[in-house]
Amino acid sequence: MPVPFFDITRQNNPLKKELDKALLDAAHSGKYILGPNVAELEKEFAIYCGAKHSIGVASGTDSIELALVAAGVKPGDEVITSPFTFVATAEAIVYCGATPVYVDINPQTFNIDASKIATKITKKTRAILPVHLFGLAAEMDKIVDIAQKNSLAVVEDCAQATGAQYAGKRVGSFGLGAFSFFPTKNLGCFGDGGAITTNDAPTEKEVKVLRNHGSREQYRHNVIGFNSRLDELQAVILRIKLPLLDSLIEKRRNNATLYYEQLKGIKQIALPFEPEQAKHTYNQFTIKVKDRDKLQAHLKAQGVASMVYYPISLHLQEAFAHLGHKAGDFPESEAAQKEVLSLPIFPELSKAEINEACFAIREYFQQ
Ligand SMILES: *Cc1c(COP(=O)(O)O)cnc(C)c1O
């Protein structure tokens, strides 16, 4: 039996009638741009995240960029972030005219190592942009503390971690939250979508102005803005899926438990780590192994899909060559890129499929 890495149709099929009706109603409503479903979703999503406000935007990448602009990041500023993330995190910083300043990761959590942030703060630093990678919250108590002491903004890249918690609070409620509704994320739509969360009313207003061509009043443009609105049809889908999100996360966590049980005896594998203060959402279940490529080839031959997130740290990517980094600058991130392997973990994966994946892994290690 082949084991797929991801199959969204398993989530959508049982919702088909409900989705079809709601989508058709919205399609024939004539209200396509910033319609009633976007407004309702914004209220519902803010409540879910434990934030005062949320604003729908066109993608997760846009959510980071607009959050940075709203946080006051300007050309020439520096933004501290992780080199071990999806490219969009650093792209959004560069779109603002700012410079990504990387801080190496904690090899156990794959998240920015908060104890190394302070040494990278300069007069130009404007914000800290932690990424809650693979669905696990970064150390938000320490990060918020450093930011407050240095008067820096905090923008959380929550793209992979919708619903994740740190010290009992959801991500996106600590600083400005930047979320993605790309189909593979914890809460996904049928294309691109994103949202920003904030506890600050003026910031909410500012983001609403930014996403709509910098316009406070129709055809008066106060700042250079963006065309970055969450689509009404995507909001319809998200409103149907948001009430299911906690149960989808529990299914991911149950799948993770099955992996932990079956793989814990294999000493060549480092399993994902869940710190005490954090509730992991397992958007990815990412293990570390020394001979990663060989294991991946073995799994592929057995029909078990897997992915490498991410094979090249951002400081070594050609697109960021202008920053002047070289191999060796961030050793933990570079070690991770050689060893990480993400296994299938989506909520609707069956126990039999997980057993099959684990069997293939144990077979490889002859255990
Ligand atoms: C997916 C992702 C993004 C970008 O989201 P899009 O909706 O695809 O633009 C940003 N950061 C991280 C860490 C992501 O995984």
Image: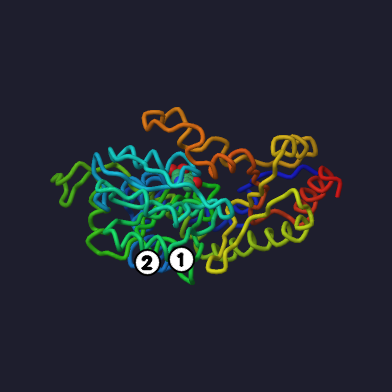
Q: Earlier in the sequence, mark 1 or mark 2?
A: 2
Residue depicted at x 82% and y 42%: 364
Could you classify mark 2 by the number of other residues whose Cα lies within 10 Å: few (under 14), some (14-19), or many (20 or more)? Answer: many
In the image, is residue 319 above or below residue 218?
above
Secondary element at image label 1: strand
Q: Where residue 171 sits in the image (x, y, percent)? A: 45, 62
Residue depicted at x 57% and y 60%: 281
Q: Is residue 97 left or right of residue 107?
A: left
Per the rendering, the mark at residue 170 is 1
Q: Quadrant of residue 259?
A: bottom right
Residue at the bottom extreme of this rendering: 168
Task: Give, as a three-letter code, the residue at label 1.
Answer: Arg
Could you classify mark 1 by the number of other residues whose Cα lies within 10 Å: few (under 14), some (14-19), or many (20 or more)? Answer: many
Circle 2 residue: 51
Secondary element at image label 2: loop
In the image, is residue 199 above or below residue 222?
below
Q: Quadrant of residue 172?
A: bottom left
Q: Where residue 344 sits in the image (x, y, percent)? A: 67, 48
Q: Can residue 16 be seen here? A: no
Disc 1 and disc 2 in contact, CB within 8 angstroms = yes
Q: How far apart are the two marked residues, 1 and 2, measured between alpha carbons?
A: 9 Å
Residue depicted at x 48% and y 70%: 167
Location of the N terminus (image quadrant): top right
